[in-house]
Image (spheres, coloured by chain):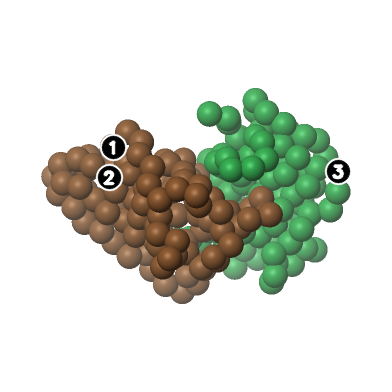
Chain colours: A brown, B green
Amino acid sequence: GESVGLHLPTLSVQEGDNSIINCAYSNSASDYFIWYKQESGKGPQFIIDIRSNMDKRQGQRVTVLLNKTVKHLSLQIAATQPGDSAVYFCAENTGGGNKLTFGTGTQLKVEL
Amino acid sequence: GAVVSQHPSRVICKSGTSVKIECRSLDFQATTMFWYRQFPKQSLMLMATSNEGSKATYEQGVEKDKFLINHASLTLSTLTVTSAHPEDSSFYICSARDRQGWTEAFFGQGTRLTVV
């Protein structure tokens, strides 16, 4: 949902550690979810997606977990690198519609 | 992946003037495009859905006369901020999907609008 007036939560991790970014979504009818990475001053970039009929999907260094019971999504980044520093958003696609609703976002900071 | 190009990347305009932002799908046709607005340190807020050949669908609270959307072709949507005021200063981003269904949306690089 929207987060007007709120600042982004921040997750700080050491380079090489694993990162876990969480997202709570609002619509139980949502059938498709996407994680995006946004660097400062740029548009969002696709990271990984998952359909509602799955509970886990893996990509290169990233894993998305979906828990429909509690409407929770997480993004795991293995061996976090400085280039992973960015804001990460989850987005949900409501069944029957074609638009995405973005979550609050999390600022990931990778410390050397 | 598919490419969405947005222009300009930055624009400064005087209060009271209008600004047009273009969003193009470079290697696919998009019957639907989406316009978002993003304030610093905040999430993307959907403003409207741009439909090729028909009127745009605006989200609740978004003034359609303020933010004019035109989707005249399958590869181009434009957003015009009319009679801009300083509070319209924001980061505007467009997106499109290259097909229906469970598929990612591709985003433009965004337009930083500053109204002085």
Taking the spot 40% from the left edge, 55% from the top edge, the residue there is A66
Position above or below: B32 against A97: above
Which residue in the protein does label 1 denote? A61
Amino acid under label 3? Gly
Mark 2 vs 1: CB contact within 8 A: yes
Select label 2 or label 3 by which is in front: 2
- Give the labeled residue for mark 3: B53
Q: Residues within 10 Å of mark 3 (few under 14, many from 20)?
A: few
* Residue visible at 36% across and 51% down in the picture: A65
Q: Pointer 1 indicates a residue of which chain?
A: A
Which of the 4 image quarters holds residue B36?
Answer: bottom right
Q: Position of residue A82 (x, y in %)?
A: 23, 41
Instruction: Please indicate, yes or no, whether residue A24 appears anywhere in the rendered image.
Output: no
Q: Is residue B3 left or right of residue A40?
A: right
Query: Do marks 2 and 1 share a subunit?
Result: yes
Above or below A73: residue A61? above
Q: Chain of mark 3?
A: B
